[in-house]
Image (cartoon, helix red, strand yellow):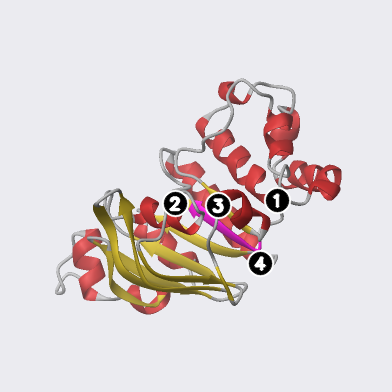
């Protein structure tokens, strides 16, 4: 579904992503993991057309991925950004409806009802201003807005960031549920342990390039991952 080869990208002359390779197969969860500042959000912005490609190639469903963000969205690659980026002065319902502005507009009413079934709390707060929601509710709203566009591939950028442990559990349960319904997901996270539990494949990013990749179940037991992200030495593991 998504093929990234030799990708380099950044801001002006500053290169953040350096020669990155990555694949996402249909119907799979692929986790991109790494500490803050290693280039994960830069990768997402490049995939969704918010930053130019400096070098390399991106193909989506067999075709080159390029152009502006609106064109990429219309092809079905939908990015739910870090920090939610909801419209705080608009209602919950209005935020959701904006998700179908460029894609799936003709099925807006039906998809809105699906979102209210998926997220009952959003139905209860449909006329409430989005900025007054709790952090967890705002994250539900951001994901629901993305789903309104009927994504072929959904990019989730740090969906657990800033949530309580209980809400983090709910968020990963939601990711499992969406994937069980057939949704392909590129999950970009700092939460290594739970991401590896839900993902099929994972990539570990360091300094803008991939240091490790493979089946998530194998990486979960890799001593290098345990040492780098869990603070465990090989003997402890």
Coordinates of residue 173 in the picture (x, y in percent):
57, 55
Query: Which is more N-terminal, label 1 or label 2?
Result: 2
- Region of the chain picked out in magenta, as a range: 152-156
Residue 155: in magenta span: yes
Q: Which residue is mark 2?
A: 45
Query: Which is more N-terminal, label 4 or label 3?
Result: 3
Q: Which residue is mark 1?
A: 149
Q: Which residue is mark 3?
A: 68
Discs 1/4, front? 1
Which element is circle 1 on? loop
Coordinates of residue 108 in the picture (x, y in percent):
81, 44
Cα–Cα gap, marks 1 and 3: 17 Å
Q: Which residue is mark 4?
A: 180
Discs 1/3, front? 3
Query: Which is more N-terminal, label 2 or label 3?
Result: 2
> Neighbour class for label 2 at 10 Å: few (<14), some, many (≥20)?
some
Cα–Cα gap, marks 1 and 4: 18 Å
Residue drawn at x 38%, y 51% is 41
Which element is circle 4 on? helix
> Neighbour class for label 3 at 10 Å: few (<14), some, many (≥20)?
few
């Amino acid at each position: 579904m998504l093929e990234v080869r030799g990708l380099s990208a950044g801001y002006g002359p500053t290169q953040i992503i350096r020669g990155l390779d990555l694949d996402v197969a249909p119907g799979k969860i692929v986790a991109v993991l790494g500490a803050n500042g290693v280039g994960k959000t830069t990768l997402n912005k490049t995939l969704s057309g918010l930053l130019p490609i400096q070098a390399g190639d991106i193909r989506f469903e067999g075709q080159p991925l390029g152009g502006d963000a609106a064109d990429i969205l219309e092809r079905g690659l939908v990015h739910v950004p870090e920090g939610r980026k909801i419209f705080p002065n608009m209602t919950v319902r209005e935020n959701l409806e904006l998700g179908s502005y460029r894609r799936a507009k003709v099925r807006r009413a039906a998809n809105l009802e699906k979102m209210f079934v998926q997220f009952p709390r959003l139905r209860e707060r449909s006329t409430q201003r989005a900025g007054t929601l709790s952090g967890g509710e705002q994250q539900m709203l951001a994901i629901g807005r993305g789903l309104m566009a009927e994504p072929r591939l959904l990019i989730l950028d740090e969906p657990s960031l800033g949530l309580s442990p209980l809400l983090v559990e709910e968020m990963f349960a939601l990711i499992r549920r969406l994937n069980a319904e057939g949704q392909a997901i590129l999950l970009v996270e700092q939460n290594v342990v739970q991401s590896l539990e839900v993902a099929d494949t994972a990539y570990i990013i360091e300094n803008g390039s991939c240091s490790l990749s493979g089946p998530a179940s194998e990486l979960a037991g890799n001593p290098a991952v345990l040492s780098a992200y869990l603070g465990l030495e090989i003997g402890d593991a």
